[in-house]
Amino acid sequence: LLLQPFCTKAQFLNGKAKQDLTEKLAGLVAELYPRKPLAVEQRVLAVLWHLLGHSPGTGAAAGGSLRGATAGLARALRAHMGPSLGTHAATQPLHVRRALQELLDTGT
């Protein structure tokens, strides 16, 4: 029940609150994906694309805790979605796909 409000808030918060909620979403992926994969894909992927496409500090060249939280979310999604994460990413703009790949390749 909290997935949708958390996902909505994660896109509009700033600073530490955005980082904390992104980390919470990564934990929810592990808990919810086995039972509600479509809900996770619809809502959490939208947050990931937003973070990768609009938030400064999520690219591989940037440092910071939001970047780490975004990487954790990407890794959680990859762990549960497997190759279908790449399939979904293929529909995103090039800069988003590159940022995702950089986060997954660097492990941070």
Image: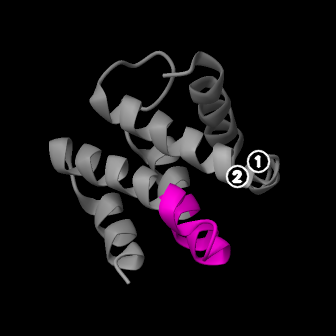
Relative vertical location of residue 89 with respect to residue 100 in this rendering, above or below:
below
Query: Label 1 belongs to which residue?
Result: 82
Tell me the residue at 29%/29% (across/down): 65
Q: Is residue 43 magenta?
A: yes
* Left or right of 12 in this view: 40: right
- Prevailing SS of the magenta stretch: helix
The amino acid sitting under disc 2 is Gln
Q: Position of residue 66 (x, y in %)?
A: 32, 35
Closer to us: 24 or 9:
24
Tell me, yes or no, if residue 49 can be seen here: yes
Q: Position of residue 33 (x, y in %)?
A: 60, 65
Name the quarter where the N terminus is drawn: bottom left
3 or 97: nearer the viewer = 3
Residue at image position (51%, 42%) is 52
Residue 62 falls in image quadrant: top left
Residue at horizontal 67%, vertical 52%?
Answer: 80
Locate residue 67 relative to residue 39 in the image: left or right.
Answer: left
* Mark 2 or mark 1, earlier in chain: 1
Q: Which residues are magenta?
A: 29-45
Count residues near mark 1 (Cα–Cα under 10 Å), then give few for <14, some for 14-19, many for 20+.
few
Q: Is residue 40 magenta?
A: yes
- Which residue is labeled 2 in the image? 92
Location of residue 5 in the rendering, given as x and y in whole percent from the top left corner: 32, 77
Mark 2 Cα-neighbour bin, 10 Å: few <14, some 14–19, many ≥20:
few
Q: Secondary structure at mark 2?
A: loop
